[in-house]
Every structure is written in C-alpha cells, then in structure tokens.
Amino acid sequence: MTGTLAHIWRHPIKGIGSEACERADLTPDQAVVGDRAWALLNADAEDTDNWQPRRNFLQVASGPALAAIGAVSTDTGVLLTHPDRDPLDFKPDTDPTALGTWIGDLWPADRPGPARLVKAPEQGMTDVEFASVSIGNLSSLRALSQKAGMHIDMRRFRINLWLDGLAPWEEGDLLSRDITIGGATLSPVEPIERCRAPDANPQTGARDIGMLRTLEDGWDTRNFGVYFKVKSGGTVAVGDTLQ
C-alpha cells in the first residue's frame, strides 16, 4: 500500500472554520497541534475544563451555515470569514463573546444560542473522547462524488489528513496496523461514523445532499475516514509518504 499526504486541515475552533496547512505537528495524547483548540459553548451547557460531547457546542450538524466559515490562524489569534459577514479578527483567549456576536443569525434561533468561547483540554475538543487525528482517502472521496453525481468538497468531513494514491476504501485496511507519515507514527482506533454535518456545502452553508443516505446506498455504511492516535510525535507535511 502506497500513498501520499495530499492535504492537511485543522480547525482552530470546533465546528467553526477550516484552515489548510502545509505542515503540522503531531504530539502523543493530543489532536493535531492547534486543532479544535477552542469551542463555542452553547447556553445550555457548562464549562467543565474537560472534554465534552459536541452537543454542548455550536457545530455544523445543528447549524449548517457554519460550514461556510473559513479560518486562518494569525500571530495574535484567529481570522474568520463568511460570505455573509465582514471578517472577524479576534483573540480567543481575551474575547470570549466576540465570536457568538459575530455568528448571530448564522445559528438557528430554535437552538440554544452561543454562550462563550472555552479553551479545550490538551487533547483537543474533537468529537471523540480521546486525542484523535482523523485521516481520509481522496480516492474514496472521488468514489463518493461519483455516487452522489456532484463534487463533494473534502471540507465537509472536517478531516485532518487526506491521503492520495490509495484505492477507494483502502483506508479501512489501515485499521490493522500502525502507520508512519513524515516524522510521526500513528495507531488506528476506529472508523469515523458520520452525522449530518457533511450535508452542508462549505461554499454556501446550505444542506444540499443526504450524505448518510449516499454512503448507505453505495456501501452500506455510515463510516467515512478513520480515527488515529499519535504514537510517536513529529512533523508531517504535504507530500510526505505513507509507510
């Protein structure tokens, strides 16, 4: 099995914005450094200083318009963009309410509204209760696009590392062994079971596909991508080879 690391993505704020990177640092017991480092707590949840499930935060599965937010990490904070908003350049650690104000009616009125931005524990505020790095296969994404009859943007899945050069669905074979990419070694944990978040188009913020139905009709699964944990840390970069 041969493959190449084609894309790296991190999401500085859980469920809000995607950022493309040329390289990233991986550390044991952490997510991709800088990934899901913050999360916007909703008004029905409490900040526990620990990992919490996604239902406690604003996220794309409940608010599809959030899918169209872009993110860029700056020297002082995070710059967010959306086609229906002026950019927001803010410091998460000193401006805990700025993001909720900026989001405004991008979030559904019938959902608990934004309360404040909270810092994630060291493991990152990913969707699972362990420090995860998500890996996807571009060949599987192409097969999914063909099945759907439309281009499926990789950002829908909020995956960290995208591999190219594998056969479609060959990422499932990675569950049987450790892998090395660049300077890091990762151990597989489990497939990623999907929710409604990938229904939302990251260009428009509108739901335009039933992704779960497409996966089920084509391959009798709700899984897309694989969760890994970092076994040995190091830097990964676009162009690195899968070993």
Image (cartoon, helix red, strand yellow):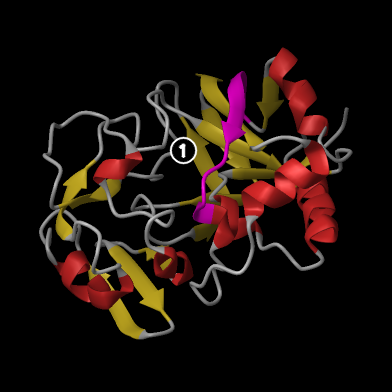
Residue 155 forms part of the magenta stretch? no
Residue type beneath disc 1:
Val
Looking at the image, residue 197 lies above or below residue 25 = below
Name the residue rendered at 19%, 52% in the picture.
Answer: 42
Q: Is residue 187 magenta?
A: yes
Residue 137 locus on image (x, y percent): 74, 42
From what the image shows, is residue 208 above or below residue 49? Answer: below
Q: Residue at x 26, y 61 (%)?
A: 77
Foreground: 122 or 208? 208
Label 1 residue SS: loop
Question: Considering depth in this image, is 124 or 157 the residue closer to the camera?
Answer: 157
Relative side of 141 to 101, left or right: right
Disc 1 packing (10 Å; few <14; some 14–19; many ≥20): many
Please state if 243 lies on the left or on the right of 205 as rendered.
right
Quadrant where the N terminus sits is top right
Q: Give the labeled residue for mark 1.
A: 32
Quadrant placement of the C terminus: top right
Q: Where is residue 56? Give x, y as percent.
A: 25, 43
- 1 vs 20, left or right, is right
The image position of residue 160, as x and y in percent, is: 56, 44
Q: Magenta region's main secondary structure?
A: strand
Q: Residue at x 52, y 22 (%)?
A: 229
Residue 60 visible in the current orientation: yes
Query: Which span is picked out in magenta?
Result: 183-197
The front one of 92 and 221 is 221
Look at the picture and state if 70 lies above or below 19.
below
Q: Position of residue 109 (x, y in %)?
A: 24, 69
Q: Nearer the viewer, residue 115 or 5?
A: 115
For the point 87% across and 32% down, which residue is it? 2
